[in-house]
Amino acid sequence: DVKVTQSSRYLVKRTGEKVFLECVQDMDHENMFWYRQDPGLGLRLIYFSYDVKMKEKGDIPEGYSVSREKKERFSLILESASTNQTSMYLCAGRGGSYNSPLHFGNGTRLTVT
Amino acid sequence: QKEVEQNSGPLSVPEGAIASLNCTYSDRGSQSFFWYRQYSGKSPELIMFIYSNGDKEDGRFTAQLNKASQYVSLLIRDSQPSDSATYLCAVPSIDSWGKLQFGAGTQVVVTP
């Protein structure tokens, strides 16, 4: 079974801190994604990566950056955390074919105070 | 026009009845369709996927594609309280099929 693992289930950080959210997948997926999900706003794509060291902006990249140094690991970085970045963050992996489904990690609920 | 649209609900369904959810998509060339279930506070989990070559049944779940009208349906037979969740539909994005475009989700509430 596909496994996407996010390093933290819950995280509390202070405004202005630099925050790292880590994600690891075990299925050799080419594509990896970071979403955030807020009540009433649905899933919003922050960044995605289709290969090592490759990244593309999603719908809401402002305030975030990503790193993909190895195929299995995709990190989301909040350069200077703000309260409006309090959210559920979801990492996902997807194979390289058109028909491949997306597999989500368990999510990280981040609270910025 | 959004790429994927769903009625947000809530869809209230008596226990034992059939829940019917629809998802419309804008790209006539879409060939893969994915259904996810998301419980409150949890991440989405894949429950069904179909391709343009036909419908699919898996246990109590059936996914049906209507290409002419550009919508895909999810039927949940013999609905149970454990089916109460938000159901998300997704299709490969028009501008980059490596991404999936998600609908906003339909909330289903199964009442005993």
Image (cartoon, coloured by chain):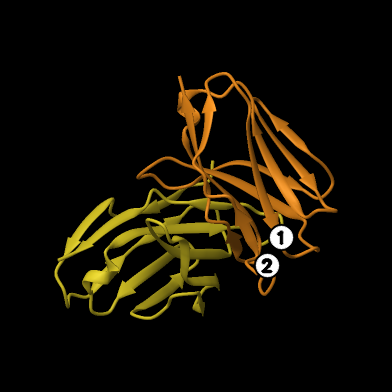
Report which residue position mark 1 lands on: A98
Report which residue position mark 2 lands on: B97
Q: CA distance from mark 1 to mark 2?
A: 7 Å
Residue B102: image quadrant is bottom right
> What colour denotes chain B?
orange
> What colour denotes chain A?
yellow
- Name the spot of residue A58 as percent of width and height, x first: 50, 74
Label of residue B57 in the image: none
**Element at label 2:** loop
- Name the spot of residue A13 as percent of width and height, x first: 17, 65
Circle 1/circle 2 CB separation < 8 Å = yes
Position of B74 relative to B13 (above/below): below
Q: Are marks 1 and 2 on the same chain?
A: no
Residue drawn 52% across the image and 44% down it: B9
**Element at label 1:** loop
Q: Is residue A42 left or right of residue A79?
A: right
